[in-house]
Amino acid sequence: MDILGRKVLEQKENSTQINIEGLNKGIYQLITSEGKSYTSKFIKE
């Protein structure tokens, strides 16, 4: 999700990597729910 709460990318397959090349520069929040919920923020420069 972007900083405004809009979903910008969804990945349904099990993977330890996420391709963020297509995202614009900005602040994002990563949310996972594979058994356990996990949230993290990151900045793409």
Image (tube, grey):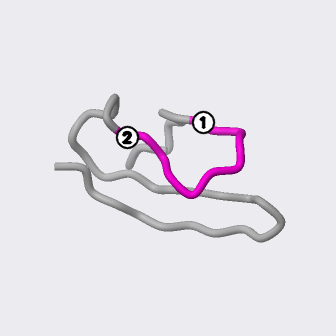
Q: Residue at the location (51% across, 56% down)?
A: 30
The residues colored magenta run 10-20
Return the x and y of residue 44 as percentages of the image width and height.
24, 50
In the displayed structure, would residue 27 be above or below residue 12?
A: below
Q: Mark 2 points at which residue?
A: 20
For badge 2, the amino acid type reads: Ile
The structure residue drawn at horizontal position 77% and vertical position 60%, both measured from the top left corner, is 34
Q: Is residue 19 magenta?
A: yes
Quadrant in the rendering for residue 36: bottom right
- Is 10 left or right of 4, judged from the image as shown? right
Assign the magenta stretch its main secondary structure.
Answer: loop
Residue at horizontal 38 percent and vertical 51 percent from the top: 28
Q: Earlier in the sequence, mark 1 or mark 2?
A: 1
Q: 21 left or right of 16? A: left
User: Label 1, on which residue?
Assistant: 10
For the residue pair 19 and 33, the one nearer the viewer reads as: 19
Name the kind of residue labelled 1 in the image. Glu
